[in-house]
Image: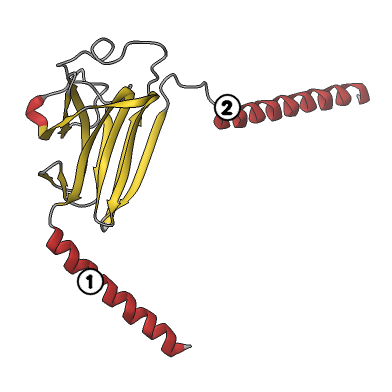
């Protein structure tokens, strides 16, 4: 009987050890993943009274000819890799001279050698641009393409503020760069709201000083 009990205890110990190893492996798998060929990037920038956020895939040049070959001229491109690029505006904006309501949109590009058509589309949940429907376009703006002095290996989208209420959406890859100007759609309303917010902050600050 003693021998049998020891055998059972040994079996239980082995089982517990296996469970611990499995739990450790699961925890390890949750912390690590296989490196992505085109890693996903999320960018968020304070803009006026709200924020702009972008979610996109970042392919690399990897010795390939990009524009005019990998990304054909005159065809709609997902502006990144894998699932389509998503851009979210926390308030209505002036997107390159055209008004866009607050919300989330798919960002697409039709490149040519000297200029890019940058498109905001209602469908932001598609894979690539395979189901792109121009009927779902909200706005499009055409902007010039500038040649970079140094190669941009990984596709990049950034938001560069030019003042507290405006900025540029900057898109660059390989030797090409394009920018779309961003401003509040209703600047007068923004100024009035900002003034009111400053008044509220002052009232709160004065009240805090009185209590102390």
Number of the label disc, if any, that sits on residue 142: none
State the CA–CA distance, disc 1 to disc 2. Answer: 50 Å
Q: Which residue is found at the position 61% from the left and 32% from the top?
A: 27
How packed is label 2: few (under 14 Cα within 10 Å), some, or many (20 or more)?
A: few
- Between circles 1 and 2, the one closer to the viewer is 1
The disc placed on residue 195 is 1
Q: Earlier in the sequence, mark 1 or mark 2?
A: 2
Q: Residues within 10 Å of mark 1 (few under 14, many from 20)?
A: few
Q: For the point 19% across and 50% down, which residue is it?
A: 183
Q: Which residue is mark 2?
A: 29
Residues 118 and 148: in front is 148
Tell me residue 182's x, y (percent).
20, 46
Numbered circles on residues, count? 2
45 relative to 56, above or below? below
Q: Residue at x 93, y 26 (%)?
A: 2
| Colour approach in the figure | secondary structure
Q: Residue at x 19, y 18 (%)?
A: 113
**Circle 2: element type:** helix
Farthest-out residue, right: 2
- The quarter of the rendered structure image containing the N terminus is top right
Q: Quadrant of residue 145?
A: top left
């Amino acid at each position: 009987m003693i021998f049998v009990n020891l055998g059972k205890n040994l079996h239980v110990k082995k089982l517990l050890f296996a469970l611990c190893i499995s739990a450790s492996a699961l925890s390890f798998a949750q912390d690590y993943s296989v490196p992505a060929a085109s890693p996903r990037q999320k960018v968020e920038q304070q803009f006026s009274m709200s924020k702009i956020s972008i979610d996109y895939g970042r392919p690399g040049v990897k010795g390939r000819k990009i524009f005019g070959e990998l990304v054909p001229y005159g065809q709609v491109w997902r502006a990144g890799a894998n699932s389509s690029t998503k851009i979210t505006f926390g308030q209505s904006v002036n997107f390159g001279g055209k008004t866009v309501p607050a919300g989330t949109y798919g960002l697409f590009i039709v490149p040519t050698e000297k200029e890019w058509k940058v498109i905001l589309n209602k469908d932001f949940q598609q894979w690539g641009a395979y189901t792109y429907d121009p009927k779902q376009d909200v706005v499009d703006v055409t902007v010039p393409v500038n040649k970079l002095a140094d190669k941009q290996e990984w596709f990049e989208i950034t938001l560069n503020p030019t003042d507290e209420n405006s900025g540029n959406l900057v898109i660059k890859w390989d030797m090409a760069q394009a920018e779309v100007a961003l401003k509040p759609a209703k600047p007068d309303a923004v100024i009035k709201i900002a003034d009111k917010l400053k008044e509220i902050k002052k009232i709160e600050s004065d009240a805090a000083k009185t209590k102390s």
